[in-house]
Amino acid sequence: MTRRQRTAEQVAIAKRNGICSATYYSRINRGWSVERAISEPPAKSHRPVRNNRECAIYKGEELLADGTVDEVADQLGISRETVIFYGTNTYKNRIAKRGSEKSRELIWLDDDED
């Protein structure tokens, strides 16, 4: 069996275990064993967000939208996931590097889950 065939078989096993191919290759490149890379469940990137959680999106001082996550997504014509992404540390770090005056900022209006 060639290396390519072995890799394809390993990726197929990973996918059956709920691990996408990009995650599999990333794990291998970071030095994980094949067994661990194809079997360890992926980490959750964020906690689930309640459908009724209230938030607001600002661009500088301007309020762009407010309401539940789904309402804000509808108002702005973006996906629910994008609204949630605006509240992640990854996004906050990204906008900190390039300046936040033109970036959108998510504010949770009910601070009980932060």
Image (cartoon, rainbow, N blue to C red):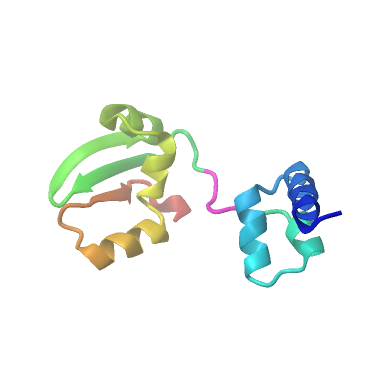
Across and down, in percent, residue 40 comes to: 75, 58
Nearer to the camera, 85 or 58: 85
Residue 94 occupies which quadrant of the picture? Answer: bottom left
Q: Residue at x 33, y 42 (%)?
A: 55
Extreme residue toward the front, this view? 2
Residue 21 position within the rendered picture, expressed as x and y whole percent measured from the top left: 65, 49
Q: Can residue 43 be seen in this view?
A: no
Viewed as shown, does residue 25 lie left or right of 107? right
Q: What secondary structure prevails in the magenta region?
A: loop
Residue 28 against residue 39 in the figure, above or below: below
Residue 87 spot, x, y in % from top left: 37, 52
Residue extent of the magenta highlight: 44-48
- Which quarter shows the N terminus? bottom right
Q: Can residue 97 be seen in this view?
A: yes
Residue drawn at x 79%, y 50% as measured from the top left: 5
Q: How many marks?
A: 0
Q: What residue is shown at x 81% (from left), y 55% (from top)? A: 2
Relative to 32, is 112 above or below? above
Pinpoint residue 84: horizontal percent, then vertical percent: 41, 45
- Residue situated furthest bottom in the rendering: 31
Residue 56 against residue 74 in the figure, above or below: below
**Hey, which quadrant is residue 42 in on the image?**
bottom right
Q: Which residue lies furthest to the right in this view?
A: 1
Instruction: State which quarter of the image contains the C terminus.
Output: bottom left
Residue drawn at 77 percent across, 68 percent down: 33
Q: Is residue 81 magenta?
A: no
